[in-house]
Image: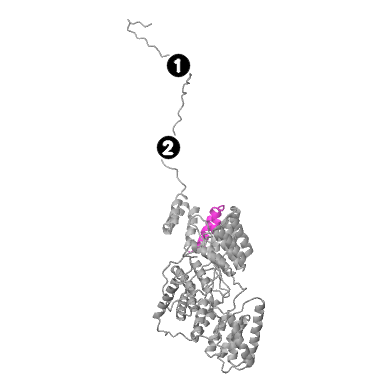
């Protein structure tokens, strides 16, 4: 009880509850000693600290600045900076200094022998120097360090292909596809099968490639051209249509589709397609060659000569264009000009029998019978299984009253035709019709009053130079095909700083312009079309195989349609040479007419 009278106050403590009593006291924690922070970031080793800046300038293609930084880096590091030496090697290669780049990459391999990227770049430089065996050895060393590397297997296959060791090349490329599927491996494997003349196997490979990459217009176009090689035109048209669906301006697909229409004598629609292709490749020799042969099929000889001369201007060493020019001049009765172009074609393609036959026709009309006979005999020596040569020579001999010799060649012709029919091959009806006239004439021996049959060339009036074989088909300059280039394309490309896919195929499209009227003095030959070489058409009816196609395709021998004979040559055009200013207008008028009429539905 508190005393109210006193001055002292009594403090009454609050009573503690049970909950308050159970809370434990917080233990004291000793705070750790605080370490002082460093005033700056740790120093990077001097031979690596500029790598990021070297990389930045390299990917920007600022090579001069990059080389200055590399020199500073190497001077500070005493030449021991692997990355700086590596990038310097890449820059040297881009500048075309392959040997210098090889030395630099070998230095990188010495600095770090366990880095497979260094060995890959050494092997690539050896490949670019055409030292394929040495490149194979280095790639094999890299494969021991890095297992299951698609790039190594692919490039090993490419090197073996250049060494013509196709079995090892196929083995390595198939191994690359098992590690990782890639379009360029399919393309190279298909090219090897085409070099082995196995078109069906190449079709299977490209079908697998299309399944893997169904929207690639290059693969679709090449597959369509391969189907054209084996006469499966429906599948060819489907694949070419799919290619144009994904890329309506794809030049190869457009020209391939146009060539199919041209081969079926649908010249107006073919010209319409070529007009679209000309927007992308206005200076393509195969394009102007095909346009010229479309006009030739329509009997527009002035326009045909104008377009073919444009093609010849762009590709003066392409024998196919010269062949076609000789044929058109022969058809128009300009035998001296025909002789000129055919002689030039023979200088470039001396093993084609039909060229000598056409030359003999021109010589016969120029009243040089001796040289014409020699040309016929040489043509028979080159190809004794061409009935058109035998029949033309028979006509030539009959026109010069050598009935005994003519009778012998006529017998050879009849025997050859019988064997061809027995084997199921088709013989041109024009040849048979002419033979039906020549045979009785030889037997009767009376040529008086009978019009002299002009020895003719292969009948191409009903065809136009169309199919090519790109592959895509790869044409190379063998047999009747003007190949894209004499050397194999380089399929390996660098990547920026760190080596990446070295096996990338590049396809560049030319800038497009509207189709200009064809001047009478220009011609052309550019790759726009196939890497496949085709068959089935006589040379003058085939378009040129453009440059840049996937590979060289062999000629398909079976089922080739035999050419016929022109029984009578038409009279020269009534147009005078000085009317050159009308040629461009006529070509443009014909193209507009084709553009308005007969356009097929979009593929």
In the rendered structure, does residue 143 fall within the stretch colored magenta? Answer: no
> Start and end of the magenta stretch?
96-121
Q: In the figure, 366 relative to 43: above or below?
A: below
Q: Residue drawn at (59%, 76%), measured in percent from left and top?
A: 561
Q: Residue drawn at (43%, 52%), measured in percent from left and top?
A: 53
Residue of label 1: 17
* Crowding near the residue tagged with mark 2, few <14, some 14–19, many ≥20 C-alpha atoms within 10 Å: few
Residue of label 2: 37
Name the dominant secondary structure of the magenta segment: helix
Q: In the figure, 377 relative to 503: above or below?
A: below
Q: In the figure, 162 relative to 82: above or below?
A: below
Give coordinates of residue 554: x percent, y percent.
59, 70
Q: Secondary structure at mark 2?
A: loop
Q: Are marks 2 and 1 in contact (CB under 8 Å)?
A: no
- Considering depth in this image, is 230 or 597 the residue closer to the camera? 597
* Crowding near the residue tagged with mark 1, few <14, some 14–19, many ≥20 C-alpha atoms within 10 Å: few
Instruction: Give me the C-alpha separation between circle 2 and circle 1.
Output: 49 Å
The N terminus - image quarter: top left
Residue 372 left/right relative to 512: right
- Considering depth in this image, is 340 or 492 the residue closer to the camera? 340
Viewer can see residue 129: no
Tag in front: 2 or 1 = 1
Give coordinates of residue 491: x percent, y percent.
53, 63
In the rendered structure, does residue 99 fall within the stretch colored magenta? Answer: yes
Give coordinates of residue 316: x percent, y percent.
48, 77
Name the N-terminal-most of marks 2 and 1: 1
- Considering depth in this image, is 277 or 33 the residue closer to the camera? 277
Q: Secondary structure at mark 1?
A: loop
């Amino acid at each position: 009880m508190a005393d109210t009278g006193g001055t002292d106050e009594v403090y009454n403590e609050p009573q503690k509850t049970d909950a308050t009593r159970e809370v434990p006291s917080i233990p004291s924690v000793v705070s750790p000693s605080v370490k002082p922070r460093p005033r700056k970031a740790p120093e990077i080793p001097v031979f690596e600290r500029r790598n990021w800046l070297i990389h930045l300038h390299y990917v920007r293609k600022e090579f001069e600045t990059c080389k200055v930084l590399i020199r500073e880096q190497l001077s500070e590091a005493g030449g021991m900076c692997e990355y700086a030496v590596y990038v310097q090697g890449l820059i040297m290669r881009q500048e075309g200094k392959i040997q210098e780049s090889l030395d630099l990459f070998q230095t990188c391999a010495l600095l770090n022998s366990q880095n497979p990227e260094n060995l890959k770049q050494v092997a690539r430089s050896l490949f670019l120097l055409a030292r394929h065996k040495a490149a194979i050895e280095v790639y094999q060393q890299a494969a021991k360090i890095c297992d299951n590397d698609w790039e190594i297997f692919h490039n090993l296959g490419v090197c073996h292909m250049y060494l013509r060791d196709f079995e090892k090349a196929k083995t390595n490329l198939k191994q690359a596809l098992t590690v990782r599927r890639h379009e360029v491996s399919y393309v190279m494997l298909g090219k090897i099968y085409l070099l082995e003349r196995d078109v069906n196997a190449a079709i299977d490979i490209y079908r697998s490639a299309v399944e893997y990459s169904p929207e690639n217009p290059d693969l679709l176009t090449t597959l369509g051209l391969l189907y054209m090689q084996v006469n499966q035109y429906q599948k060819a048209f489907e694949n070419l249509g799919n290619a144009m669906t994904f890329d309506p301006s794809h030049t190869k697909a457009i020209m391939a589709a146009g060539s199919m229409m041209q081969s079926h004598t649908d010249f107006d629609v073919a010209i319409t397609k070529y007009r679209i292709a000309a927007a992308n490749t206005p200076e393509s020799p195969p394009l102007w060659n095909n346009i010229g042969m479309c006009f030739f099929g329509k009997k527009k000889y002035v326009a045909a000569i104008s377009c073919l001369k444009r093609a010849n201007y762009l590709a003066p060493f392409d024998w196919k264009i010269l062949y076609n020019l000789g044929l058109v001049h022969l058809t128009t009765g300009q035998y001296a000009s025909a002789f000129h172009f055919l002689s030039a074609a023979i200088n470039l393609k001396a093993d084609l029998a039909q060229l000598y036959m056409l030359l003999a026709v021109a010589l016969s009309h120029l009243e040089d019978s001796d040289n014409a006979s020699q040309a016929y005999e040489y043509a028979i020596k080159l190809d004794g299984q061409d009935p058109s040569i035998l029949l033309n020579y028979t006509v030539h001999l009959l026109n010069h009253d050598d009935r005994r010799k003519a009778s012998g060649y006529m017998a050879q012709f009849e025997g050859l035709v019988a064997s061809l029919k027995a084997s199921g091959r088709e013989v041109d009806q024009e040849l048979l019709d002419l033979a039906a006239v020549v045979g009785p004439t030889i037997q009767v021996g009376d040529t008086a009053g009978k019009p002299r049959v002009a020895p003719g060339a292969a009948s191409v009036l009903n065809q136009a130079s169309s199919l090519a074989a790109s592959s895509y088909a790869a044409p190379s300059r063998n047999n009747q095909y003007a190949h894209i280039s004499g050397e194999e394309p380089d399929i390996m490309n660098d990547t920026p700083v760190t080596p990446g896919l070295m096996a990338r195929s590049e396809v560049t499209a030319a800038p497009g312009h509207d189709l200009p009227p064809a001047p009478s003095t220009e011609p052309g030959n550019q790759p726009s079309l196939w890497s496949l070489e085709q068959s089935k058409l006589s040379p003058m009816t085939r378009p040129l195989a453009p440059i840049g196609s996937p590979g060289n395709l062999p000629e398909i021998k079976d089922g080739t349609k035999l050419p016929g004979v022109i029984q009578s040559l038409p009279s020269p055009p009534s147009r005078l040479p000085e009317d050159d200013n009308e040629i461009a207008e006529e070509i443009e008028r014909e193209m507009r007419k084709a553009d308005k009429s007969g356009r097929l539905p979009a593929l």
